[in-house]
Amino acid sequence: MDNGFNKTVQLLKKNELILSVAESCTGGLIAKYFTDFPGSSIFFDSGFVTYSNDSKINLLQVSEKTLKENGAVSGEVVREMLNGLLKNSKIDVGIAISGVAGPGGGTDSKPVGTVYIGWVLKKFDCYIEKFHFVGDRKLVRKKASNKAIIGLFEYLNKIQIIKK
């Protein structure tokens, strides 16, 4: 993990923000990166690996209707994953991610490498972005995880939560 990861961790610590993540295609890799950081219990609360639709429904209260209408790899599902994080954790900030890591599972409209990442800060609107990462399964998961972590820093800067 590069310097952007350190900036993100420092921002969380400086602002006393507690983080939780909801991961699908990355399978816990984002949580791993955060918990690799010594002292991560100061800012990291929990990680939900909701790989199956059933786990998204049962652990994060993603609606079955949303999954059927949009598919698991969609901004709508990521939004509901973020809402589930806020409801099921005592957190300030969250990351949710769902995508197609490959090598199979892609479609014409959602090819392998399609990933939706969302960020939320309690009492603020969430921000969701669609990405297409190129590479094999391992590389797609790594790139998506890196973007989720760096994207958190960018999101928090956009809403200007940094303590001066």
Image: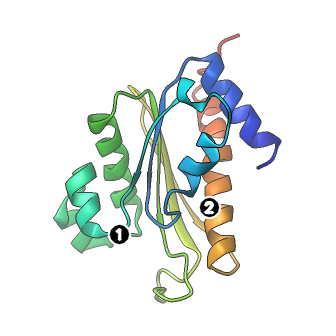
Q: Residue at x 64, y 71 (%)?
A: 140
Quick one: 62 or 126, which is closer to the camera? Answer: 62
Q: Residues within 10 Å of mark 1 (few under 14, many from 20)?
A: many
| Residue 133 visible in the shown view | no
Nearer the observer, 149 or 34 = 34
Q: Quadrant of the C terminus?
A: top right
- Reply above or below: 146 against 20: below
Q: Is residue 63 left or right of residue 96?
A: left
Please name the residue that numbered disc 1 is placed on.
72
Specify the label residue 144 is tagged with.
2
Is 45 positioned to the left or the right of 88 in the image?
right
Picture disc at residue 116 = none
Q: Considering only vertical position in the picture, is 109 above or below 73?
A: below
Q: Quadrant of residue 14?
A: top right
Q: CA distance from mark 2 to mark 1?
A: 16 Å
Q: Is residue 97 above or below residue 120?
A: below
**Which quadrant of the view contains residue 49?**
bottom left
Q: Dot 1: what SS?
A: loop
Which residue is at 34% across, 51% downward?
81
Q: How far across and how far down the image is residue 61, in percent? A: 22, 51
- Give the percent coordinates (x, y) of residue 83: 31, 42
Residue 3: x %, y % from top left: 82, 41
Extreme residue in the top direction: 164
Q: Amino acid at mark 1?
A: Ala
Mark 2 element type: helix
Other residues around mark 2 within 10 Å, as few (<14) / some (14–19) / many (≥20): many
